Image (cartoon, rainbow, N blue to C red):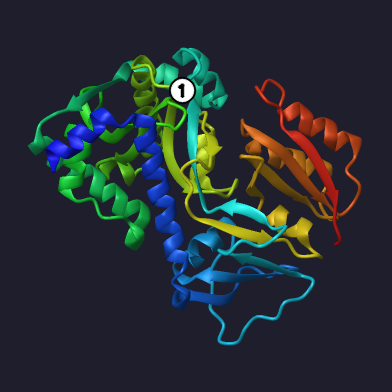
Amino acid sequence: MKTLRALGRRLVPIGVRCGARRLRARLRARAALTRLWHWELVSLTGAPRPYRVVYLGLDEQRSSTSALLNLDRAEAQTTPPKLTARTALVSAAPIPKALRVPLQVHMVVPLDGPLEQVAERFDTQLRKRLKSQRPRYTSVRVTSPSEVDLLTDTMLRPYARDRHGADAQPLPRGLVRKLALKAGRLELLCRDGAPVGCRVGYPHTMNDGTTAWVLWRLGYPREVFEDNKQLGDINAMNVYVDLERVIADGYDHYDMGACIASPDNGLLQWKRRRGGTPSAYHSDEWVSVMLPRQGAAQLLWDAPLLAAEDGHLALWLGLPAGRSDEELLERCRSYRFDGLVRVHVCSEREVSALLREGLARLYDGFGDRPELAPLKVAA
């Protein structure tokens, strides 16, 4: 079997192999949707809002759908929810004229220049802090199976359990060994000579032949992740040092991994401040979002969305009557993502020239400035 795999890698172009893996993953995701006995029709509830959200889809995706819409919790109802003009319908099934929204995106840093140029996308204060602290840190590749197992047990697993609790994905020693010693690499981060963190990643070739390094897992000892300030500093440096090596090795992209596709998501924003831009290339789980006929602006104010359009992602924002142009512009400073094709503003009043100009200025300096698409909606 190993011989056949090795022969296949030699004879089949890498782009074809990557395309086959992507197709297999998408077929798996679509096959899951055929399990109609796992579908449910429920209301997604949270703090009182002037609209309702009804979910039709797999019960296992309800939690991630609630997170996408910034809802606190998701409770099933024994009776079918009533659909009104103030009801938003969210479904795993395609809905004509609805937004097609990924449940997760990968945050990817384009490596189109030297480290100094790439780091210009970072938050200014973060960039200064990293530069001043960098001399204290060293990084070394771990090549011993016993050391890989030790870091799995003392850093990778404890940090995953602390971060995700019961939802933490299992980390079998065999899988970590395979990535660390064969498919990718495991690096140990030290500060002033003392181990303070580690990271696991692997290379990936895109369909267009460009190469990406995927950051798979981060790990820290308990004394680090139980101290929020220390964790913040070391976590930022761990990624920065990894980025240094990836650029030096000649990769085209640095994939910082998946996160909930909500522009307000904390992990997504953490990666944005480090130069990441959202990509749905790896997204296999999608939902259709049919906005309510009344209250769409408030829904999109509470939960801005990234939706697929023309093979790219577009940003959907809301401006309800009770919010000012200045408030929306201030929020949009956190939504400055490169690569967007459009920025839709669903407003309960005419979009002012001030707002148009302000949004345009936010995207100055981007390679491709998104088109501004205002839309007046009912309150």
Q: Judge whether 306 appears above or below 109 on screen.
A: below
At label 1, counting other C-alpha atoms closer than 10 Å, the crowd grade (few under 14, some 14-19, many 20 or more) is few
Q: Identify the image quadrant of the N terminus.
A: top left
Tell which residue pokes out farthest to the front in this image.
11
Place of residue 345 in the rendered image (x, y in percent of width and height, measured from the top left)? 78, 46
Left or right: where does residue 245 sit relative to residue 295? left
Disc 1 designates what residue? 129
Place of residue 149 in the rendered image (x, y in percent of width and height, measured from the top left)? 13, 42
Tell which residue pokes out farthest to the bottom in this image.
79
- The residue lying toward the viewer, choosing from 5 and 177, is 5
Q: Would you identify the image quadrant in which residue 165 lies?
A: bottom left
Q: Residue at x 35, y 15 (%)?
A: 248
Place of residue 259 in the rendered image (x, y in percent of width and height, measured from the top left)? 47, 47
Question: Is residue 184 visible from the viewing direction of this image?
Answer: no
Q: Judge whether 287 appears above or below 188 on screen.
A: below
Left or right: where does residue 57 sit relative to residue 312? left
Q: How many marks?
A: 1
Q: Would you identify the image quadrant in which residue 203 lies?
A: top left
Q: Secondary structure at mark 1?
A: helix
Q: Residue at x 47, y 28 (%)?
A: 208
Q: Residue at x 71, y 54 (%)?
A: 300
- The residue lying toward the viewer, choosing from 345 and 373, is 373
Left or right: where does residue 170 sit relative to residue 105? left
Q: Judge whether 298 appears above or below 228 on screen.
A: below
Question: Is residue 212 visible from the viewing direction of this image?
Answer: yes
Left or right: where does residue 138 sit relative to residue 73? left
Q: Which kind of residue does numbered mark 1 sit on? A: Arg
Q: Identify the image quadrant of the C terminus.
A: bottom right
Q: Judge whether 59 appears above or below 71 on screen.
A: below
Place of residue 324 in the rendered image (x, y in percent of width and height, measured from the top left)? 83, 46
Q: Residue at x 36, y 55 (%)?
A: 164
